[in-house]
Each structure stands twice: as structure tokens, then as C-alpha cells.
């Protein structure tokens, strides 16, 4: 069996997956993303699934040879996640995909993972919630960060109304050996689980179409359709424990929109605004597309408003010295302003 070289593990696994996907596309006359799901299922089952004579015997032989060229048990979770990420990037080239379905960049995922690790008390067990989990790239990045920081038992709960993206998320979690429970439903409907330690999400931006359902939320608009990202913030924090945190990727103009009053009204009664960190402008096509990381903390369990809200803008991710300095400033803020009451 071929042992993939460590420095090229993700790229090599992606190449095997990509070749497999292209074979299945031809054999099954399907989209790239559907062939990706089929490939993931084959890798999990360690067997090429055949239905109604498809794929053909010749294709099965080719696929089996490809799968036998790798040993997933020798690859760590992050390597497997990156290979799936590369596959999803190719999906954006091959298939039509909505902007809200695109992946959260790794660096942003790792920053959110760092914030979760540093904000939550040391524990042997944690539960992470994402109500817009999509393909699970952000969720699995954060879970891996937590496990890497000596938290052995991490459970993820993800909700999404897109069953195709959830299928990718499930495959990703299974191949990485991660504990991720997924729910296919409207995240703003009734949720059939309890409260988590922390909520994370790269929130979709836009209007929520179900007017009557939106009215159940304090963050709903007074007139017309409500912003889905406002509603998801409220819903997410309602499923986080007292004193627990929510860390969300949001538009930088979050508090400047016409519906900001409703969001602020909800926050005054339910959650403390502890931080708002702008991501580098260079990451976005224009200023209006810029995003920020919002840090909220639920009331209760001894939580208080930080002495000073953490505000700032990340330096370029390419400037390692400045980036490291800024991360140090966040840690200093946590110690001196957030937790030192």
C-alpha cells in the first residue's frame, strides 16, 4: 500500500478523490458534488457501491485500485478535512454554488477555534453548536483545534436546510473520526436538542422568507422580511448555556443596518457584546463585503460585561509578526478586561 508523503498528504488524498469523482461523474451522469458524496460513502464503507449495474465492472476495478492506494488510518483529521476542502473548492468550479455555500477560509476557522479555546474554561468535555453548518468545514476545524488543545471529548451539533451540504458534512466528520450530530431542518424552527457550551457560525446573510416564523424573534424586523443572520444569532444564543459564548462571522456593517435596533434591543436583554473584530479588508472584494468576528456572551452564571469591549482589526494574515502581536492583544484583553472583574 502506498504511504502518502507527509508534506503532500492532503494534496495526494485530494488527487485520489478527484480521479474517483471524475470516474463516477462519467459512470453515473451526475454532478461533481454528488459524485463527491458517492466517493465519500465509498471511502467510509471501504467498498465501491454498485446499483443497477452502475458503475461498470471496469470502473469498479479502477476505483478499487485508487482507494487501495491510500490508507486513511495513517492520516490525521486535519489532513482529511483539507482534502475535502480542496474537493469543495473544485465544486465551485464545476457546479453552480450559492455564495452562502462557500467554505469559510482556514485561517478564519483557526482564529474562531483559538477564540473558543481561550474563552471557554478548561474542561474534558465540550459541545459546539453551528446553526448554519453547511459542509462542516468551520465546525470540524474548530473541533480539531479543541482536541489539539487537550479537550478529549468534543461533540458538534450542526443544523442546515440543505441536505447535500449536510451529506458532505457527515462524510467529512466520519472520515475524520469526529463526533458530529447533524439535523436537516430550518434552523429557525423548533430545535430538538438542549443547550451547548458555545455557538459558532459563518452566518448566511440575507432575508428570511418565512414572515410569520420570524415574528417569534425579538430581532425580527418591524416591517417586511427580517435579516436571517440577526435571527440566527438570537436562536443560536438561546441554545447556549447561561454565561456561554457565541462567536459569529458577520457583516462588518452589522450595527449600521436599518434593522440594527432590533438586534441591539435583543442584546440588551439577553447577551453581552464582548468583542467585535474586523477581518482584513484585503480578504474581500470591496468594503461592503467585509466581515467581522462578533463575540457575545449570554447573561447568567456569573457573566458580566467586559471592562472594555474588544474592538480592532486584524492585520494582514501575511504579516506573521503583526498577526501574532494582535492575537496576543486578544489574550491580554481576555485576562485583563473580560475575566478580571
Image: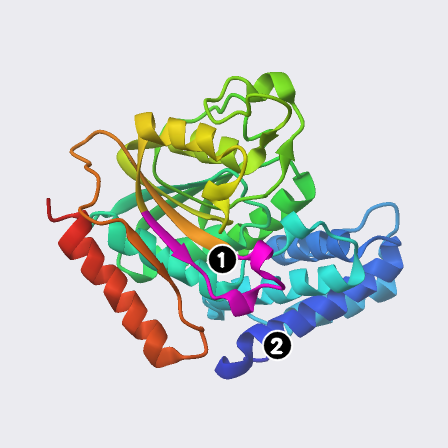
15 left or right of 217 in image: right
Q: Is residue 108 magenta?
A: no
Tag 2's secondary structure? helix
Quarter of the C terminus within the rendering: top left
- Tell me residue 189's x, y (percent): 55, 23
Across and down, in percent, residue 304 comes to: 19, 37
State the mark number for residue 176: 1
Compared with 158, 87 (above or below) is: below
- Residue of label 2: 12
- In the rendered image, is residue 13 in sight? yes
Q: Identify the residue at image location x=69%, y=44%.
A: 164
* Mark identifier at residue 284: none
Q: Distance between the residues labelled 1 and 2?
A: 16 Å
Q: Residues within 10 Å of mark 2 (few under 14, many from 20)?
A: some
244 in relation to 223, above or below: below
Query: Which element type, helix, strand or loop, lies under badge 1?
Result: helix
Q: Which residue does the image show at 53% across and 25% down from the upper left? A: 220
Out of 216 and 241, give the one closest to the viewer. 216
Task: Answer whether labels 1 and 2 touch (C-beta < 8 Å).
Answer: no
Name the N-terminal-most of marks 1 and 2: 2
In the image, the segment drawn in magenta is 275-290
**Tally of numbered discs:** 2
Amino acid at each position: 500500500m502506498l504511504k502518502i508523503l507527509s508534506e503532500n498528504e492532503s494534496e495526494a488524498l485530494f488527487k485520489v478523490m478527484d480521479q474517483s469523482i471524475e470516474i463516477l461523474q462519467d459512470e453515473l451522469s451526475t454532478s461533481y458534488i454528488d459524485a463527491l458524496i458517492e466517493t465519500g460513502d465509498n471511502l467510509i464503507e471501504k467498498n465501491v457501491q454498485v446499483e443497477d449495474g452502475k458503475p461498470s465492472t471496469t470502473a469498479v476495478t479502477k476505483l478499487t485500485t485508487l482507494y487501495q492506494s491510500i490508507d486513511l488510518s495513517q492520516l490525521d483529521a486535519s489532513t482529511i478535512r483539507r482534502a475535502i476542502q480542496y474537493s469543495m473548492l473544485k465544486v465551485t468550479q464545476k457546479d453552480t454554488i450559492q455564495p452562502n455555500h462557500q467554505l469559510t477560509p482556514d485561517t478564519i476557522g483557526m482564529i474562531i477555534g483559538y477564540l473558543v479555546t481561550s474563552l471557554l474554561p478548561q474542561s474534558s468535555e465540550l459541545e459546539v453548536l453551528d446553526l448554519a453548518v453547511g459542509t462542516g468545514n468551520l465546525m470540524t476545524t474548530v473541533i480539531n483545534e479543541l482536541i489539539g488543545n487537550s479537550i478529549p471529548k468534543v461533540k458538534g451539533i450542526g443544523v442546515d436546510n440543505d441536505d447535500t451540504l449536510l451529506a458532505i458534512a457527515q462524510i467529512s466528520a466520519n472520515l475524520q473520526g469526529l463526533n458530529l450530530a447533524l439535523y436537516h431542518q430550518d434552523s429557525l424552527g423548533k430545535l430538538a436538542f438542549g443547550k451547548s457550551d458555545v455557538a459558532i457560525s459563518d452566518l448566511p446573510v440575507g432575508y428570511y422568507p418565512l414572515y410569520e416564523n420570524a415574528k417569534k424573534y425579538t430581532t425580527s424586523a418591524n416591517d417586511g422580511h427580517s435579516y436571517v443572520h440577526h435571527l440566527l444569532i438570537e436562536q443560536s444564543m438561546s441554545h447556549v448555556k447561561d454565561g456561554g459564548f457565541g462567536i459569529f462571522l458577520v457583516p462588518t456593517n452589522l450595527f449600521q443596518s436599518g434593522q440594527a435596533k432590533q438586534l441591539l434591543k435583543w442584546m440588551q436583554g439577553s447577551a453581552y457584546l464582548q468583542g467585535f473584530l474586523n477581518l482584513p479588508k484585503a480578504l474581500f472584494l470591496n468594503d461592503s463585503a467585509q466581515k467581522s468576528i462578533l463575540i457575545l456572551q449570554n447573561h447568567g452564571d456569573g457573566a458580566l460585561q467586559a471592562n472594555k469591549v474588544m474592538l480592532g482589526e486584524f492585520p494582514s494574515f501575511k504579516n506573521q509578526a503583526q498577526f501574532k502581536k494582535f492575537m496576543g492583544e486578544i489574550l491580554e484583553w481576555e485576562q485583563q478586561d473580560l475575566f478580571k472583574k
